[in-house]
């Protein structure tokens, strides 16, 4: 990858990493804390009936601007992230590139002959309205390892199947059109790795929902405790 000619011929596939999504989630949570702190600092907090429960506490204002500065810094830092894959159509290699400002990590994920197929992978997520399926493009190795080539997206299965047909020749492998509501797996058949798609089944609980619930169940009490101690300090 040090050869500019190699980088020039590669196909770039951009997608957001879980680290970037985590940064965005923390920044969003801090923006909520900023709103609460600045509202309490300038106006106080009122009850639903309109009567003021807590008078304005100007001592909260510096903390509000501090959380605002941190949240904006986190959001600005997302611009410095570069997360993408490079497909070399000549050597049939797949590279992963993770970069933050001047720091960069680039590694070979699959070499020629190590990719079994390009296809779409599915993930069911449970919501109040029912189960919704999300899909993403993946490169599946002969060892069963799945390397994501895109983010999860609701629907769009036909788009990922078409993209798989486009990328497969560039990695020297086959493409498989994934059926709706399926999860791709690799099983051994007659001593050879074979791509299969699991039948649809409702998830016991949405993984994304559990992660989000765990995140907010951990972060919100911390914010509430910080706010409580800040208010206690300001009222003394």
Image (cartoon, rainbow, N blue to C red):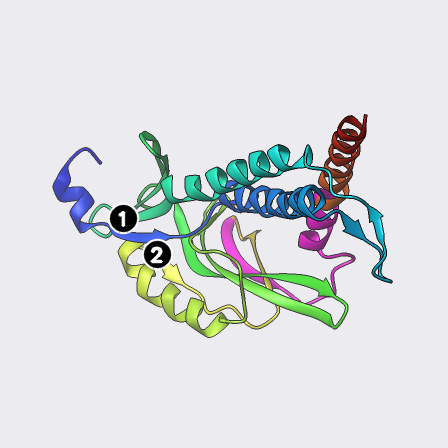
Left or right of 69: which side holds 31?
right
How far apart in space, not on screen, are marks 1 and 2 (Cα)? Answer: 9 Å
- Residue 82 showing in the rendered view: no
Mark 1 residue element: loop
- Residue 165 place in picture, x, y as percent: 35, 67
The residue tagged 2 is: 173
Contact between marks 1 and 2 (CB within 8 A): the answer is yes
- Residue 26 showing in the rendered view: yes
Instruction: For label 2, count other residues whose C-alpha is less than 10 Å away and answer few (under 14), some (14-19) or many (20+).
Output: some
The residue tagged 1 is: 92
- Residue 117 place in picture, x, y as percent: 42, 56
- Residue 176 place in picture, x, y as percent: 44, 65
Viewer-closest of 132 and 177: 132
Viewer-closest of 142 and 190: 142
Residue at 72%, 44% (x, y): give it.
Answer: 40
The answer to whether 153 is drawn above or below residue 229 in the figure is below
The first of marks 1 and 2 along the sequence is 1
- On the image, which quarter does residue 137 sit in? bottom left
Quadrant containing the C terminus in the rendered view: top right
Name the residue at the left extreme: 5
- Residue 73 place in picture, x, y as percent: 47, 38
Residue at 68%, 62% (x, y): give it.
Answer: 125
* 184 inside magenta stretch: no
Read off the magenta span.
Answer: 192-215
Disc on res. 206:
none
Quadrant containing the N terminus in the rendered view: top left
């Amino acid at each position: 990858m040090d050869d500019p000619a190699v980088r020039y011929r590669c196909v770039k596939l951009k997608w957001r990493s879980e680290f970037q999504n985590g940064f965005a989630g923390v920044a969003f949570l801090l923006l909520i804390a900023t709103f609460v702190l600045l509202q309490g600092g300038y106006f106080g907090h009122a009850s639903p009936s309109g009567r003021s429960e807590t008078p304005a506490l100007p001592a909260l204002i510096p903390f509000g601007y501090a959380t605002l500065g941190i949240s904006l810094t986190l959001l600005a830092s997302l611009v410095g992230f570069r997360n993408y894959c490079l497909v070399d159509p000549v050597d049939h290699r797949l590279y992963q590139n993770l970069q933050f400002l001047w720091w960069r990590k680039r590694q070979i994920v699959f070499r020629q002959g190590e990719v079994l197929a390009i296809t779409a992978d599915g993930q069911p997520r449970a919501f109040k309205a029912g189960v919704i399926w999300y899909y993403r493009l993946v490169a599946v190795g002969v060892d069963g390892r799945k390397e994501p080539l895109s983010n999860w997206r609701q629907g769009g299965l036909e788009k990922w199947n078409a993209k798989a047909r486009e990328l497969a020749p560039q990695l020297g492998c086959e493409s498989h059109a994934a059926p709706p509501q399926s999860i791709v797996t690799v099983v051994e058949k007659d001593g050879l790795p074979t791509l299969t798609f699991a039948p649809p089944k409702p998830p016991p609980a949405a993984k994304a929902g559990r992660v989000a619930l765990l995140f907010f169940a951990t972060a919100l009490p911390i914010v509430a405790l910080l706010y409580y101690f800040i208010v206690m300090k300001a009222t003394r």
